[in-house]
Amino acid sequence: MNFNFEGLFSFTKNIFLKIGCPEKDAQTATEVLLSADLRGVDSHGVARLSGYVRLWEAGRINATPNVRVVHETPSTAVVDGDAGLGLVVAPIAMQIAIEKAKNAGTGWVSVKNSNHYGIAGHHAMQALKNDMIGLSMTNASPLVSPTFSKERLLGTNPIAVAIPANKEPAFVADMATTTAANGKLEILQRKDEQAPSGWIQDSEGHPTTNPYGVKEGGALLPLGGDREHGSHKGYALGSIVDIFSAVLSGANYGPWVPPFVAFLQPDPNPVGDGIGHFFGAMRVDAFRPADEFKDHMDNWIKRFRSAKTTPGNEKVLIPGDPERELEQERMKKGIPLLKPVEDDLRTLGEKFDVPFKF
Amino acid sequence: MNFNFEGLFSFTKNIFLKIGCPEKDAQTATEVLLSADLRGVDSHGVARLSGYVRLWEAGRINATPNVRVVHETPSTAVVDGDAGLGLVVAPIAMQIAIEKAKNAGTGWVSVKNSNHYGIAGHHAMQALKNDMIGLSMTNASPLVSPTFSKERLLGTNPIAVAIPANKEPAFVADMATTTAANGKLEILQRKDEQAPSGWIQDSEGHPTTNPYGVKEGGALLPLGGDREHGSHKGYALGSIVDIFSAVLSGANYGPWVPPFVAFLQPDPNPVGDGIGHFFGAMRVDAFRPADEFKDHMDNWIKRFRSAKTTPGNEKVLIPGDPERELEQERMKKGIPLLKPVEDDLRTLGEKFDVPFKF
C-alpha cells in the first residue's frame, strides 16, 4: 500500500518529538529518514524508525545532544555527536564542512560518538545548492568480511559523492562498498530466491547463495565478491571509509562498531565513542569558475547518457538517475510500505499515542 | 632475468636526460617509474619507458615543462602541467597538496595538461613522511565501458590512498576501478588462458572470456563486472576519478582523454588540456593528535591481519602488504623483466647511445 509523503512525514516527526527531540532536530531527522524512502533506499527509511526508538529506550541515543566541534583547522573539524541520532548529527557536521569550504576552499569533518545516519547520499547532496561537491561516508555494524577473512570486521560502509551540473541534474553516487546491500537479502528472503554468487559467504567462509547466510553467521562480501573479481578493492574501500570515519575522529572502528539493533550489546571494551562518519565539501570555484565546471559536467553527463548500449539495455544511466526518478514518482504517488513495516509503525504509533492514519 | 635496481635506475635516468629532461626531473621521473617495478605494478614501470619516449618524439610530451599553479585557495590548487611527463608533474602537484595541508589542514590539487603519471600509489605515499594521509587518482585512455554501455568512455582510473601507522607499515590501497587492470590481460595472453567472467566485454557488448577482447574492440568492465555484482559502483568510482581529475581542472575527460600510445592520435576536438590527475593530503593532526591516530591504526591493522581466515587462505592481508613485500625482495634480488621488455630497452639504449649493460 502507498502512503503519502506528508502523512508519513508528520507521523515520523511526531514520534521523534515524543522521544524528546527538539522541534528542529525532529524536523531534520524526519527529512533525512524520509529522503531514503523517497529515493528507494527503503531499508534506511521509516522501516528503521522503531529501531532508532529502541536504541533510545536502551539509553544508547541521546535525544537532546550537544553536538560540538572538539578540534579544528581552517579546512577540517572533528565533531562529537554526543550520542545523538546520526540523522541529526550528520546534517550539522555536513553544514560545518560546507562553512569551512566557503572560507578555505574545502571542508572535511570527521565525526565520533554518533549513531546510524540514514541515507549517505542525502548528506552529500546538501553541498549541491552551494555549488560544491559533497562527500559523505559512515562506518556501520560489522556484517562484512574482508577478503580471505572468516570474521565480520567491516560494515557495509557506504560512500556518497554528489557533483553539481548546470542544466542536467546532479551526479549523485551513493553506494555500499559491498557487492550488495543487506536490504537486498531481505528482498530475496521474501521472494524465497537464492542470492547471486559473490554476495555472501557462510559462517565457515565458504561462498554461498543462501539468502539467510548472513543471519546464520556468515557475512556480506566486499564489492568484487572474490579475489579474482577484485574483492580486495571493495575491502580496501570499506576500510578507507572505516578509517576516515572512525580512526580520524576517535569513534569505534572495525569489529568494535556498536550494532544498530538494541538487542545486541556494544563491545564492553570499546576503542572509541559511538560510530563514526566523514563528510567533505569542495567549492567548485576553488578549482575553476563554477559555470565553466557545470557546463562541462552537462557535457560529461550528456555524452555518457547517450552512449550506445549493450544488447537488451535501453540507456546508460548516470549515477543518481534511478533515485531521482523514483523520488519524483513517490512524491506524487506516495511511498509503498511493506505490510510488516506498516504494522510496525502502527504499533509504534499506539505506544506513543501518535495516530497512524492515512 | 633479474636486473638490479641501481643499473635499471641509471639506465632509465640517462634516457630521460637524453630526451632533454633537466637533471632533477630525470631523477624524479625515474624514481616514480622504478617504484612501479619494485612494487610489482610491472605494466607501469620501465616497460612503459619507450612509450613515453615515443610520445616525446611525436611532440606530445614537453621535456622542459613550466609546471605552475593557475588557480588556488587556502586548501586547493589547479596545476597546469604544461604537457610535461606525468612522472614529473605529479610529484610537484602532490608536494603542493602537502604544503597546502601544512597550513590549512588539508590540500587538494587538480591537474590538467599532463600525461601518464605512472603508479598511483607512489604519489599518495609521499604524504606519509609528513604524518599525512595521501590520495592520488588519475584518468587514463578510454578502455572501460560503463554499465550498459557498448562504448569505451573511461580509463582504468585508479584510486590510491596511503594512511600512516606507527609501528605497523602504512596502509596503502592502490587500485584500478575496474575488475582487473589491463596488465592482467597481457599475462593471460602470454599464458594462452581465458579471462575470468566479469573482466571483459566484446565489441558488441557481450560478456567474453577472450583475453584479446579489449584489443579486438571490446572493453574492460568496471569493478563489479556486471549490474548484479555491482558494476554500477565501479562505474561510479571511475567516473568520480574522471571528474575530480579532469572536469575540476580543465583536462580532457571520458572518451576525449588522449591515448597513451603515440600511434593513436588525440581527439581533434578536445574538451580540455591533456590528461588530468587529482591529489589530496590530509594532516592527521588536523583531526586528532598524530600519535593517538597512528596507535589506533596499529590496532586496526593488527586486528585485521590476525582475523580468522577462510578455508585455504593463510592470512588476511592489509592493503599494501603484497607490494611492500615485493619491494623488499626486488631491492635485494633485482627486478625481473620479460624478454620483450628487455629487448625494447636494449633497442632504446642503442638509439640514444645509453648502454644497457648488466
Image (spheres, coloured by chain):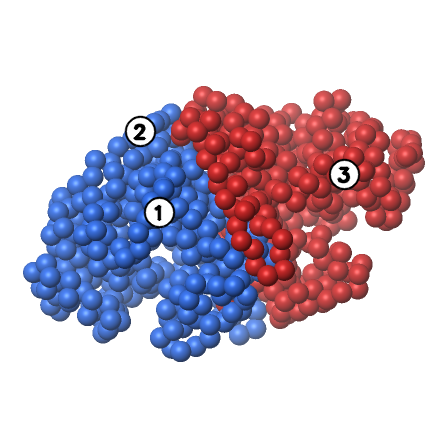
Chain colours: A blue, B red
Residue nearer the viewer, B241 or B299:
B299
- Dot 1 falls on a residue whose secondary structure is loop
| Amino acid type, mark 3 | Arg
* Nearest the eye: B133 or B153: B133
Where is residue B356 shown, x and y percent of the image?
90, 35
Residue under numbered circle 3: B330
* B85 in relation to B221, above or below: above
Question: Mark 1 sits on what residue?
Answer: A267
Image point (76%, 22%), residue name: B23
Neighbor class of circle 2 (other Cα within 10 Å; few <14, some 14-19, many 20+) is: few
For label 2, the SS is: strand
Task: Name the image quarter holding the C terminus of chain B.
Answer: top right
Mark in the foreground, 2 or 1: 1
Please report, as a chain letter, where disc 3 is located.
B
Q: In the rendered view, would you say B236 is above or below B127?
A: below
Q: Residue at x 83, y 35 (%)?
A: B4
Q: Quadrant of the N terminus of chain B?
A: top right
Q: Which residue is mark 2?
A: A70
How far from the left and from the top, in percent, is residue A101? 37, 32
CB-based contact (under 8 Å), mark 3 and mark 1: no
Residue at mark 2: chain: A
Q: Is residue A49 left or right of residue A147?
A: left
* Residue nearest the viewer, comparing B266 with A18: A18
Is A29 displayed left or right of A186 in the figure? left
Residue found 57% across the figure and 73% down from its top? A311
As measured in the structure, the alpha-carbon distance from the residue carrying label 3 to the one carrying label 1 is 43 Å
x, y percentage for residue A81? 27, 39
User: Is residue A288 visible in this depiction of the protein?
Assistant: no
- Chain ID at mark 1: A
Q: CA distance from mark 2 to mark 1?
A: 24 Å
